[in-house]
Each structure stands twice: as C-alpha cells, then as structure tokens.
C-alpha cells in the first residue's frame, strides 16, 4: 500500500526539508520506492534549465523514483517570501485545486513512500480565501509535523497539532529538530510535547555539522502504515 504524507512545520526554517530527505533516505534503506515533492516553492534561482529551488532539488535527488524537476516542483516562484506575496509580484494566482492536480499527476508514478513538503507553516496563505492546509485536505493524506526545538516550540507544536486535527486530518507523527542546541531545557520541552500530542515521536535530530540525508536518517523512524 502506498504511503503518502504531507510534511509541515511549526514555522519556516525549522528543517522540513532536512527531515523529509532523512525520512526518504530511511525509506530507501528499507527497500521502498520513494518520491519527494515540493509542489510550491518560493525562493528560486534562475538557471540555464529554468527556475530551481534548493529544497526541491534535495528532494528530487534523494528519491529513488526519478521525476523531472517540473513534476517535483511545478510552481516555482522567484522571491523568498510568503508564497502568495511572491505570486502577486509575478502576477500569478495560487490555488489549492491546481496544486492538488499537480500532485495527483506525480502520484500516478509507482512508489511505496511519498512525501509532499509544504511551504512554511500550516496556515500559509495561497490567496485571499485559501491556505496551504487545503492541499493535504484535498488529497486526504496524513501529516508529519516537524517541530523546531527552540524557545516557544511547545506553544507552536500544540497549536499546529490542534489546527491539523480541526481540519480533519491525522497527525501520523512528529519530529523534534534541535535547531537551537544552546536552548535551556530542550529535552524537557520535547518531553512536554511528547506527553501532549497523540502521535508518535519519529525521532529527535540533533544539530549536525554535516546535515546530509544519510546522517539525518540515523535519528529517524518511518511512520507506521495506516493499517499497522
């Protein structure tokens, strides 16, 4: 059975891509056919091949099922800012339906384990009436939450988990990413979140000097399949 998950974070820059690549590497080691998608990316560089986003490139390279860049990242925006604002600058309109259609096209490829990485946090706007949370709702897929362990992370984690549940989606697991290694009480914060969330902790990832997918994978477990 194909496992498909949407990866979100408690904020931007909490390590969604590093954790996603680590989970894909973990699935690769388990012999699963993997796909990583970044349907919407703001902050792209112009290259001879077209606009490219570093997060999307990492997902493309990590996956065992090779897709074209346009399948991995169909909506690429130039400016590194909130996607709806970057789209306005380019006079483009974002929509959840269109993003879902792109994802469904890529999901037709044979695969066992698929991660769809979001942009920023759970309520990132797409347009005046939609936000990115509507993408996993349309696809009816569970969510993996990346929690950046820093000051305020308990509040951010619990509010995001509440919003995911309110939207009718299952939290399949969460990952603690130690983005502030000097934070006082880091383990106590992790313990508090773990006691409060009704979802398994898939791993605690320390601050790594070499943050490769292979290194991150050492600290992660795959979420259990829905029928497990």
Image: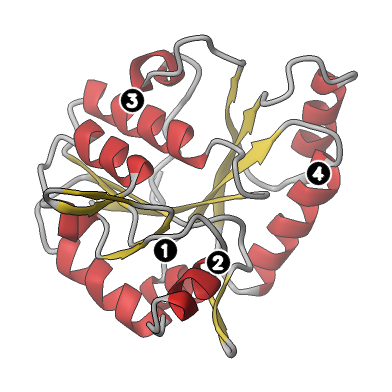
Gap in angstroms between the C-alphas marked 3 and 1: 20 Å
Gap in angstroms between the C-alphas marked 4 and 2: 17 Å
Specify whether 188 is left or right of 174.
right
Q: Nearer the viewer, mark 3 or mark 4?
A: 3
Gap in angstroms between the C-alphas marked 2 and 1: 7 Å
Q: Are marks 2 and 1 in contact (CB under 8 Å)?
A: yes
Q: Looking at the picture, how far across and down is residue 16, in whole percent?
A: 51, 41
User: According to the image, label 4 marks what residue?
Assistant: 196
Q: Residues within 10 Å of mark 3 (few under 14, many from 20)?
A: many
Q: Looking at the picture, how far across and down is residue 171, in whole percent?
A: 58, 54
Earlier-in-chain disc, 3 versus 4:
3
Name which residue lies at 67% across and 26% down: 179
Describe the element under mark 3 as helix, strand or loop.
helix
Q: Looking at the picture, how far across and down is residue 136, in whole percent?
A: 45, 68
Earlier-in-chain disc, 4 versus 1:
1
Specify whether 177 is left or right of 38.
right
Note whether 162 is above or below 199 in the view shown.
below
Earlier-in-chain disc, 4 versus 2:
2
Q: Looking at the picture, how far across and down is residue 185, in whole percent?
A: 89, 20
User: According to the image, label 2 marks what residue?
Assistant: 169
Q: Quadrant of residue 77?
A: bottom left
User: According to the image, label 1 marks what residue?
Assistant: 141
Gap in angstroms between the C-alphas marked 3 and 4: 26 Å
Describe the element under mark 1 as helix, strand or loop.
loop
Residue 179, numbered label:
none
Describe the element under mark 2 as helix, strand or loop.
loop
Q: Quadrant of residue 199?
A: top right
Note whether 91 is above or below 43 in the view shown.
below
Gap in angstroms between the C-alphas marked 4 and 1: 22 Å
Name which residue lies at 78% across and 50% down: 156
């Amino acid at each position: 059975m194909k496992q498909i998950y949407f990866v979100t974070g408690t904020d931007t820059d909490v390590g969604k891509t590093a954790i996603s690549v680590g989970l894909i590497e973990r699935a690769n080691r388990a012999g699963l056919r993997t796909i990583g998608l970044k349907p919407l990316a703001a902050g792209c560089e112009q290259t001879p091949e077209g606009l490219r986003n570093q997060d999307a490139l990492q997902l493309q390279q990590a996956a065992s099922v090779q897709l074209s860049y346009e399948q991995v990242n169909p909506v690429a925006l130039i400016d590194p800012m909130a996607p709806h604002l970057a789209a306005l600058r380019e006079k483009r309109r974002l929509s959840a339906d269109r993003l879902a259609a792109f994802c469904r096209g890529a999901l037709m490829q044979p695969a066992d384990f698929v991660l769809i990485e979001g942009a920023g946090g759970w309520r990132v706007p797409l347009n005046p009436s939609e936000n990115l949370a509507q993408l996993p709702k349309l696809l009816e897929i569970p969510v993996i939450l990346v929690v950046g362990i820093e000051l305020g992370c308990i509040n951010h984690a619990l509010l995001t988990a509440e919003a995911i549940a309110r939207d009718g989606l299952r939290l399949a697991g969460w990952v603690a990413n130690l983005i502030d290694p000097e934070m006082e009480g880091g383990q106590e914060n992790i313990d508090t979140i773990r006691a409060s969330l009704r979802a398994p902790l898939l791993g605690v990832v320390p601050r790594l000097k070499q943050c490769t997918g292979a290194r991150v994978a050492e600290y992660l477990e795959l979420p259990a399949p829905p029928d497990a």
